[in-house]
Amino acid sequence: MRKFLVILDDSRECLNAMRFAAMRAAHTGGGVTILSIIPPEEFAHWVGVGEIMRAEARERIEVHFEVYAKWMRDKQGIEPELVIREGEILQELLAHITEDGNIGVVVLGAAADKKGPGPLITQLTRASGSLPVPLTIVPGDLSKERLESIT
C-alpha cells in the first residue's frame, strides 16, 4: 500500500498537510505515516535530565498525534501510523523514506508568511531532483473547502 508521509510539528501549516494526506489516502486507498523528529539539541543536558526531556517530548508528540489520528479515523476512515525519530530533521526524513519502501509521497505544509515556506521545504526543494519520492507542498493558508475540492 502506498503511504503518504507527513511531518508532525507545531506549525500552523502542519494541519493542511495532514488534511491533504488523509484525504488523498482515503480517495486512493493509501495510508498515512506521520513522522515526528526530535532534534538532538533538545537533550544536550546531563543524562538523567536528557532522558526525562526525551520522555516528555515523546509524550507531547503522542498527544498531538492522537488529535490528528482521531480526525483521520472519524472523518476519512484512515488509521495513521506514528513514527518518532531523533536526529537532524532532513537526515531522519530521508532515512525513513529509504527504510520504508511503501512511502510514495512526502506531504509538507508551506508557511504562508513572508519568511518563506519553511526551512525543511527550502532544503527539500533544493534536493528535489534526487529525492526517491515525489514531494507535495500544501499551502498553509488553503481553506478546508479548497483542500476537499482538490483531493
Image (tube, rainbow, N blue to C red):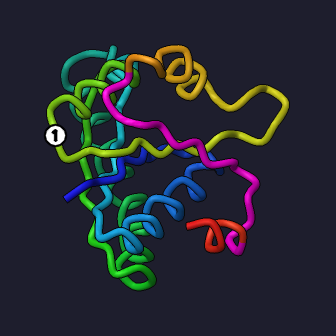
Q: Is residue 77 above or below residue 38?
A: below
- Secondary element under disc 1, as helix, strand or loop, is loop
- Judge whether residue 108 is colored magenta: no
Say which residue appears at 25% left-offset and 55% top-offset: 2
Q: How many marks?
A: 1
Residue pointed to by mark 1? 101
Counting from the top left corner in percent of width and height, residue 24 is at 45, 65
- Judge whether residue 143 is colored magenta: yes
Seen as rendered, the residue at the extreme bottom is 74
Counting from the top left corner in percent of width and height, residue 46 is at 26, 16
Say which residue appears at 55% left-offset and 22% top-offset: 125
Of residues 67 and 46, the one nearer the viewer is: 67
Counting from the top left corner in percent of width and height, residue 132 is at 31, 27
Of residues 62 and 7, the one nearer the viewer is: 7
Q: Is residue 143 left or right of residue 126?
A: right
Quarter residue 31 falls in: bottom left
Quarter residue 87 falls in: top left
Residue stretch in magenta = 131-145
Q: Is residue 90 left or right of residue 12?
A: left
Say which residue appears at 71% left-offset and 75% top-offset: 145
Quarter residue 16 falls in: bottom right
